[in-house]
């Protein structure tokens, strides 16, 4: 059973456009939701993360929107650039207050930004 | 060297071979992880070590054998692998065992013939 469901599998956006990637989860014990960015030949790197006590977190052109009641969260990239072309993974964890928390990853979204 | 390094970056092995993957973290972290990344599949957690002690084995076949001699080094010993084990093997580390902000290495691309 997949703990975190991610869509779309691939996304093509024009330069300057908005990229939106969505994730959904079922486990209400999850309390940490990071997004990772992976370029070819590299390991995933933490991009931005949110906890459920806020509904939005913004860092530069990247924003996470979080809907606790719907158990959904999304990554928005505004003014998308060719350098943003990468695979993006959402993840969830119930690590707070527990040493047994683990990261559950979505299947990834391959983003291509055309110049 | 900075961050998390992995060697070798690429490995081709036969099903009867024995090989080892190495991971080293230069971040002063005390938790280290092995992940398997296959095409079109979610990242699969394989093993977790916290302060050199294995705290999680995610039902990984015994043909994969991890070793953590200290908090900075992690090995994955491979023997009698199957072609379906071909994948990118990623090592990661974190400050604590709560597996939140993990820092990944570049991975070892493994091909089993």
Image (spheres, coloured by chain):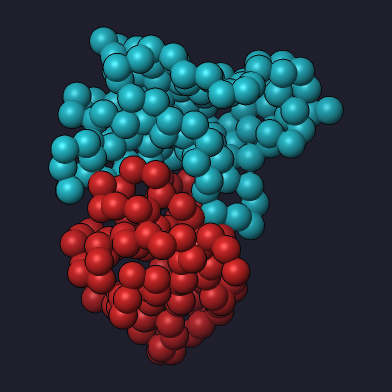
Chain colours: A cyan, B red
The picture places residue A38, in percent across and down from the top left corner, at 57, 45
A41 vs A81, left or right, is left
The picture places residue A70, in percent across and down from the top left corner, at 29, 12
A91 vs A101, left or right, is right
B79 vs A75, left or right, is left
Q: How many marks?
A: 0
The picture places residue A110, in percent across and down from the top left corner, at 59, 37
The picture places residue A87, in percent across and down from the top left corner, at 58, 40
Q: Is residue A42 visible?
A: yes
Q: Quadrant of the N terminus of chain A?
A: top left
Q: Residue B65, relative to residue A88: is it above or below?
A: below
- Residue at point 43%, 82% (across, down): B20
Q: Residue B71, relative to residue B36: is it above or below?
A: below
Q: Residue A108, relative to residue B33: is it above or below?
A: above
- Residue at point 41%, 49% (across, down): B102
Q: Quadrant of the C terminus of chain A?
A: top right
């Amino acid at each position: 059973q997949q703990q975190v469901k991610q869509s779309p599998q691939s996304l093509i956006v024009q330069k300057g456009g908005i990229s939106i990637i969505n994730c959904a989860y079922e486990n209400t014990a999850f309390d940490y939701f990071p997004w990772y960015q992976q370029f070819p030949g590299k390991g995933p790197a933490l991009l931005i993360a949110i906890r459920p006590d806020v509904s939005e977190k913004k860092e530069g052109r990247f924003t996470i929107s979080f809907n606790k009641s719907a158990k959904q969260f999304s990554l928005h990239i505004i003014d998308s650039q060719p350098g943003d072309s990468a695979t993006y993974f959402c993840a969830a964890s119930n690590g707070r207050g527990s040493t047994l928390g683990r990261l559950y990853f979505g299947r990834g979204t391959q983003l291509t930004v055309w110049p | 060297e900075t961050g998390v390094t992995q060697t070798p970056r690429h490995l081709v092995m036969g099903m009867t071979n024995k090989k080892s993957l190495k991971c080293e973290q230069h971040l002063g972290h005390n938790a280290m992880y092995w992940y398997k990344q296959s095409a079109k599949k979610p990242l699969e957690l394989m093993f977790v070590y916290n302060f050199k002690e294995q705290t999680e084995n995610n039902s990984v076949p015994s043909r994969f054998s991890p070793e953590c001699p200290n908090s900075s080094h992690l090995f994955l010993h491979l023997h009698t692998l199957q072609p379906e084990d071909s994948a990118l093997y990623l090592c990661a580390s974190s400050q604590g065992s709560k597996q939140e902000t993990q820092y990944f290495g570049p991975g070892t691309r493994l091909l089993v013939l």
